[in-house]
Image: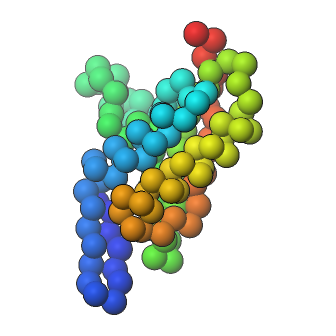
Amino acid sequence: MVKLENHLGVIDISHEYFVTIVGNAAVSCFGVAAMANANAKQGIIAKITKRDNIDKGIRVRVKNQKLVIDLHIIVAYGTNISAIVKSIMHKVEFTVQEKTGFAVSRVNVFVDGMRTE
């Protein structure tokens, strides 16, 4: 659950909805082949359940009433990694602020692999 408090009260957004917004924004960027597991726990759960988690490669934290989003991605071979990362950072920040109204402090993008397909 993503929870922020302001002068009017508390805003709660379900984790599933939030990671769906972030994941769709990231995957829709050119050059992103897939999301990678953010940690070992996600990899183990995916193997046990034999399916990908909805939050694969996404970690969200609240720090000083602003969101910090970590994304782990796999890029397509032959693409400009710097351009892909900048695109993802801008698109995710814009999409989150547009759909939720929450301020985004930073978007950290970790390139964990490359696909040649």
Front in this rendered view, residue 62 or 81: 81
Residue 76 in view in this figure: yes
Residue 57: x and y in percent read 47, 39
Answer with left or right where residue 20 lies relative to residue 67: left
Residue 12: x and y in percent read 26, 67
The N terminus sits in image quarter:
bottom left
Residue visible at 35% across and 74% down in the picture: 4
Front in this rendered view, residue 71 or 48: 71
Answer with left or right where residue 115 lies relative to residue 44: right
Residue visible at 54% across and 24% down in the picture: 33
Name above or below for residue 79 compared with residue 24: above
Q: Residue furthest bottom?
A: 7
Front in this rendered view, residue 37 or 86: 86
Rendering quarter of residue 85: top right
Number of residue marks: 0
Colouring scheme applied when the structure was drawn: rainbow
Name above or below for residue 35 compared with residue 71: above
Residue 38 in view in this figure: no
Residue visible at 48% across and 69% down in the picture: 103
Residue visible at 53% across and 44% down in the picture: 71
Q: Residue furthest front?
A: 98
Name above or below for residue 88 compared with residue 62: above
The C terminus sits in image quarter:
top right
Residue 104: x and y in percent read 51, 65
Name above or below for residue 38 compared with residue 92: above
